[in-house]
Image: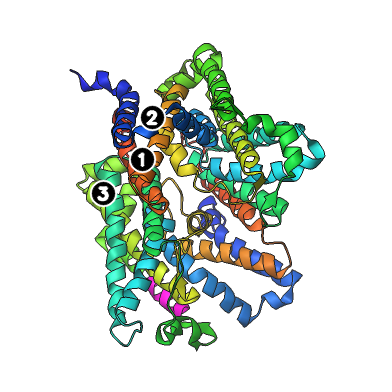
Amino acid sequence: MPRILTRENAIRWAPFMVLLALIVLFTAINPSFLSQRNFARIAIAAAPALMVAVGVTFIIVMGSIDLSMEGVVSLTAVLFCFLMLALGGTLASGGWIAIPVILVVGAAIGLVNGFIHVKLKIPSFMASLALGFVGTGAAILLTGGDIVKFNDPTFRALLTWRILGFPLMVYVAGLCLVLAWFIQAQTRLGRYFYAVGGGEELAHASGVRVQHVRMAGFSLAGFFYAIAAILQVAKLGQAESVTGSNFMFMSITSVVVGGVALWGGIGGVWNTLVGVLIVAVINNGMVVIGLPDFLQAAVLGLLVIIAVILSTDRRAVAFVK
Amino acid sequence: MDIQRLKPHFPWITLLVLVTIVGIADPSFLKPANLLSLAGDIVPLFIMALGLTFAIYIGGIDLSAQSMANMITVVASVCLAPLGIWVAALCILAGFTLGTLSGYLTTRMYVPSFISTLAVGGICFSVAQWLSGNRALNMDATQRNETFGWMIGRTGIVPHELFIAIGLLAICLLIERRTVLGRALKAVGAGELAAAASGLNVARYKILAFAISGGLAAVAGLLFSVKLSGGAPTIANGFLLPAIVAVLVGGTPLTGGVGGVLNTAIGTLIVAVIRASMLYFGIAATQQQMVFGLVLIAAIALTIDRSKLRTVK
């Protein structure tokens, strides 16, 4: 009989246990935490964040990092609103075309990101950080610093139309998560992400075209950032150059807290789901039990540090930069 | 002519070319008074870049510099009244301590520096929000002038900030060129494993590099808050990108080991001239971030030492 209490199992199930423990803790302090209404609130907060985090999961599995999400989400959100308004301002009047267009735009930005990283041989954190700045800059340029309102009731049904108490966007995010899982587990590309993350030189030696896989990964990430941007616009009814703020810190924290190793090759989108829920539950729970909201950034910071420390096998790394 | 031998000279040649171009387009740009006030305005950014140089020189990065400066503007505004001049000591100590924390997490806990500094930046942001109550704060004008007025005045046409900048640059140059610490940082930047193998206490020197970075980011925040006579949790946003650009276009590559603080001085001047020229050529302030993002990519691509990166992650 295989032992259940191994180190591997402990690491695998730790994030889920943390999530359960948090829910129990917050409920014990304030029972109204455990209500359907509050869970819907958490789900709404988590849906766009989940899409960003799923996108960056592919990158982190490859052992790289993507810090461009704030800029990409802002830019695609702004572009989406402009395009929607140009196409008549409602989904029904042809505005739906904006959705696939924006998804392609997101993927294209991601591809540029991957291209800069792979072809110019710039470490991904810096290439993506720089491109993120460019994205935010472009969003500022397009909007002139203003807010773009977009309030089509059909489109906002993503937020307002509820099934079983949860808005439609939660289900959309769920479907996209399944899509991400499919790519991760059932496609060759998904396996290649793990091959590259597990050992780039070995992957290269076994015939994986590492550069192409990397670029495809960044492109896929951009695609998911664009989904996040659309959900964020549905949630807020507007877009501006700061629409994507906070996503960088939040999504990386989520991914790492969920158990995806920063060194690559370990974890996947289900870990990310748990991680996003942990972060969303903490953010929501802190408000519910009456802690001031200025603590959130510090708590996220501590969380990501603890998660990295716990997930690092210190015998395996020589030094870090 | 060998391109590799020319490479160290690129930064000041770039600077000279840029100044010439802008000078030809707008001769009034070259007036000493204009150049000096331009240089004076960029000093808080320069001080932050000076600190970042140490983090980048050892092959790391400090993404907390901006949040640090934000937090310090708040701390300075809140504590000026009770502490007077000692607020400067408090600020530098806070920056140094938090920088030490980043360094400790990076070296002893094996958290990559971009994550550890991002996390420490989160802590700074929380502290800033807590201390300020999420509002913009103002310093008492008379007290500011009594305590820190000397920082922001002018002697003739020379802004006082420049003296501060030159003083800090001299100290950093001394550390870099004439101390054991400076040599050790060079060794770590050039090859960390070799440095460790030759018996150097690498972790200690790396922690010190991050601490210096934090300390100087705090000085930058202090000077910025004195200039603006106030502080807020997001007031220094927009510093990080040009500060990193300044270090990299100055010629300290992301891989570390070459370049140094003098390069950063030149890099900061390049940033200042780019900014001024953008205004002159009618590029709106809203586009600057985009331009600097592109400059950053170009600067990294040109300076990075690819022989040090077996696989680029």
Q: Which residues are magenta?
A: A169-178
* Nearest the eye: B156 or B103: B156
Does residue A266 sit above or below B8 in this rendering? Answer: below
Residue A292 in picture, x, y percent from top left = 71, 61
Task: Tell which subunit mark 3 falls on.
Answer: A
Kindly report the secondary structure that dominates the magenta region of the rendered protein: helix
Q: Looking at the picture, which amino acid does disc 1 mark?
A: Ser
Pointer 2 or 1: first along the chain = 2
Label placed on residue A82: none
Name the quadrant containing residue A23: bottom right
Does residue B61 sit above or below A166 in this rendering? Answer: above
Residue B80 in picture, x, y percent from top left = 75, 40
Does the magenta-highlighted stretch encompass residue B83? no
Residue A231 in picture, x, y percent from top left = 43, 73
In the image, B36: left or right of A181? right
Residue for point 31% across, 73% down: A83
Residue annotated with mark 3? A115
Q: Element type at marker 3? A: helix
Label placed on residue B30: 2
Does residue B219 sit above or below A31 in this rendering? Answer: above
Residue annotated with mark 1? B277
Q: Looking at the picture, which amino acid does disc 3 mark?
A: Phe
User: Can residue B274 be seen at all in this image of the molecule?
Assistant: yes
